[in-house]
Image (cartoon, coloured by chain):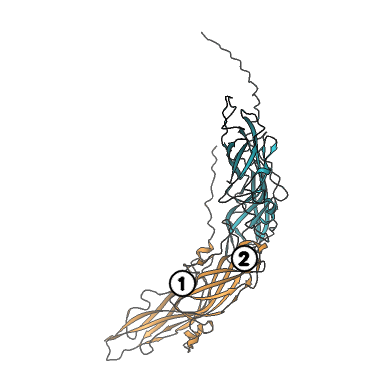
Chain colours: A orange, B cyan
């Protein structure tokens, strides 16, 4: 009698860390030949845009608009609402949406043999960078012990956290206080993505064609928590430039020596409006 | 022709060997390890937490004195709750003895807790188990005493004084060498001590500050201090003659090594030399830790 032991092939537990990476928000692509690269005047055409949400933030109040030159092209409808799920443990590739728009080229008139016009598809949406990181609390920084539970060291992050505005560095400091420490963190942030950052309030308005004040560009709202305690930060709203920008956040809670040395979650939430655009040229040829 | 050879064999009762006395060997006192999967490498929040440690006494001194404790640290106690800051008492575990020189006794220490809801998706932790205990090192050997090593005599000497290599004594602090320098009327002994256990040695009175949760850290005048309990030649204690001791009692280790010197008055010993037993007893606190990396994941909603 032969007994066969059946070994169940290992069920792979989804790895959260593989989802909360990357520096993209949306990836947008025109479907091949939709719109066509060449088309005759007075001819209907379809625009098909495939949108992949490569970030972790779910897009719920997004708006899209297809920009076109009114004298050469007519569209039935050129804007709408955008909703796409982000990357999750159940859907690690992220959500997908397909936008279909119909239009028609206009007459070029007797004098033109052809011309090239541009179509630009823009998505405007509120976005979020949610970084769940860990840092070290060392209540006895004066104790030099190689076997300590963790080390208070500067950490750099290169892969992003699943959004175009990324946390690039965290520098922790344990400020000595009576019988313990008060943690302080310098958090560096940068726009790695290719889109435009806007104040959250104005994200939808950009696609509606309304005027956006200069001061609304590149603004990011920041909130930082150490476990469940919100930290007091030097700024709750940052103005991003091409360089890294930093905020300094202090824990309102002090940690006593009796709490030892340990790892603790540090959650950083950045909220902002984001605008991404793709363009395609279309050559309109005269029929005659 | 069949040759039948009957051989009757009666099993001889195995002669009971006399104890060799060689039970004080090895460079470890306590050895501990996490039992596999206790805890597992990956856990989810809102679940029970269990850590189980196996403790072995690989040395020759009893473990589990009142001050001996094991602590679990490295994590936020608001996330893994129910783990005491005061640690768990170390169970009483006998060391190796003359009757059982190779027996290693073991016991277990368990930490039970609960993992609260996570605010982030993944919480990696370096779980550290720290043992704080009081231990003894006892080195025993024989020493040749020559009261007049350079004198002209026709007497045939019983022995020649020489250094004593002692190896390890079933403890993390070892008395590895006694240098013997015979002089007329006295013999100088330089005792060399090393920390071979890989952990941190400290003055035994400071054992409360060994804990990773202690209010105060072990200070520089507590770390690397080993109490010289006694140095005996035969039944005579020569501890009072010892020099190079901090506070008259402690060897200070530097770079895990230290030494001190004692003197033995040999003026009353026989002229031809004599072999005598020597013993050195040290007592100290010891801290050693092991770690295990785990990660706690947020339960998908």
Total number of numbered discs in the rendering: 2
- Give B99 or A268, whichever is nearer the viewer: B99
Q: Which label belongs to residue A62?
A: none
Q: Where residue B145 appears, x then y in whole percent?
A: 62, 33
In which quadrant of the rendered image does the N terminus of chain A lie?
top right
Q: Is residue B15 above or below residue B26?
A: above
Marks 2/1 same chain: no
Mark 2, secondary structure of its residue: loop
Task: Residue at 61% x, 17% y: name it.
Answer: B9
User: What is the chain identity of the residue bearing mark 1?
Assistant: A
Residue with the most extreme bottom position: A110
Q: Which label belongs to residue A24?
A: 1
Q: Is residue A143 above or below residue A284?
A: above
Mark 1, secondary structure of its residue: loop
In which quadrant of the rendered image does the C terminus of chain A lie?
bottom left
Left or right: A204 as drawn, with respect to B248: left
Q: Where residue B156 appears, x then y in whole percent?
A: 58, 24
Q: In this view, does A195 lie above or below B263?
A: below
Image quarter of residue B301: bottom right
- Give A282 or B51, whichever is nearer the viewer: B51
- Give B146 or A68, whichever is nearer the viewer: B146
Q: Which label belongs to residue B118?
A: 2
Left or right: A47 as drawn, with respect to A81: left
Q: In this view, does A207 lie above or below A154?
A: below
- Give A67 or B197, whichever is nearer the viewer: B197
Q: Where residue A187 appears, x then y in whole percent?
A: 53, 72
User: What is the chain identity of the residue bearing mark 2?
Assistant: B
Image quarter of residue A281: bottom left
Q: Where residue A198 appears, x then y in whole percent?
A: 49, 82
């Amino acid at each position: 009698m032969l007994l066969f032991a059946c070994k169940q092939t290992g069920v792979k537990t989804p790895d959260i860390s593989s989802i909360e990476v990357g520096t993209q928000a949306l990836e947008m692509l025109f479907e091949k030949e939709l719109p066509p690269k060449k088309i005759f005047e007075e001819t209907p055409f379809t625009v098909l845009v495939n949108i992949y949400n490569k970030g972790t933030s779910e897009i719920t109040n997004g708006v899209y608009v297809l920009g076109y030159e009114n004298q050469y092209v007519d569209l039935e409808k050129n804007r709408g609402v955008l909703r796409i799920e982000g990357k999750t443990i159940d859907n690690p590739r992220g959500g997908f949406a397909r936008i279909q728009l119909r239009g028609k080229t206009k007459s070029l008139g007797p004098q033109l043999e052809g011309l090239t016009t541009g179509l630009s598809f823009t998505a405007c949406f509120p976005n979020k960078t949610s970084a769940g990181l860990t840092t070290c609390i060392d209540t006895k920084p004066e104790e030099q012990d190689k076997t300590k539970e963790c080390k208070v060291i500067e950490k750099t992050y290169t892969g992003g956290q699943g959004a175009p505005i990324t946390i690039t560095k965290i520098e922790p400091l344990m400020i000595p206080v009576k019988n313990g420490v008060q943690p302080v963190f310098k958090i560096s942030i940068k726009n790695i993505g290719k889109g435009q950052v806007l104040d959250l309030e104005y994200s939808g308005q950009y696609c509606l064609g309304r005027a956006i004040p200069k001061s609304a560009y590149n603004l990011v709202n920041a909130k930082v928590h150490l476990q469940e305690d919100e930290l007091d930060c030097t700024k709750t709203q940052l103005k991003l430039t091409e360089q890294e920008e930093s905020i300094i956040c202090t824990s309102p809670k002090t940690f006593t020596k009796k709490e030892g040395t340990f790892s603790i979650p540090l959650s950083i939430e950045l909220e902002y409006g984001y605008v991404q655009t793709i363009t395609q040229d279309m050559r309109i040829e005269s029929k005659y | 022709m069949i040759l039948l050879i009957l051989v009757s064999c009666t099993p001889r009762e195995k002669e009971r060997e006399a104890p060799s006395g060689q039970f004080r060997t090895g460079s470890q006192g306590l050895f501990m390890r996490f039992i596999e999967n206790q805890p597992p490498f990956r856990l989810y929040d809102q679940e029970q937490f269990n850590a189980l440690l196996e403790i072995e006494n690989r040395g020759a001194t009893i473990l589990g004195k009142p001050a001996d404790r094991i602590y679990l640290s490295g994590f936020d106690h608001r996330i893994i709750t129910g783990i005491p800051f005061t640690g768990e008492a170390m169970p009483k575990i006998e060391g190796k003895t003359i009757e059982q020189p190779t027996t290693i006794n073991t016991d277990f220490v368990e930490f039970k807790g609960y993992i609260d809801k996570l605010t982030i998706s993944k919480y990696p932790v370096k779980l550290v188990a720290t043992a704080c205990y009081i231990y003894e090192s006892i080195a025993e050997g024989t020493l040749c005493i020559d009261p007049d090593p350079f004198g002209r005599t026709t007497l045939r000497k019983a022995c020649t004084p020489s250094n004593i290599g002692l190896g390890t004594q079933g403890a993390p602090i070892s008395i590895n060498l006694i240098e013997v320098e015979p002089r007329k009327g006295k013999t100088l002994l330089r005792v060399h001590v090393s920390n071979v256990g890989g952990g941190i040695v400290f003055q035994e009175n400071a054992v409360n500050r060994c804990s990773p949760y202690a209010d105060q850290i072990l200070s520089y005048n507590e770390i690397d201090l080993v109490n010289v309990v006694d140095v005996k030649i035969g039944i005579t204690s020569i501890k009072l003659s010892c020099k190079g001791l901090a506070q008259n009692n402690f060897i200070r280790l530097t770079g895990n090594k230290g030494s001190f010197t004692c003197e033995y008055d040999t003026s009353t010993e026989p002229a031809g030399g004599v072999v005598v037993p020597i013993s050195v007893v040290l007592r100290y606190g010891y801290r050693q830790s092991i770690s295990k990396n785990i990660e706690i994941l947020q339960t998908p909603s």
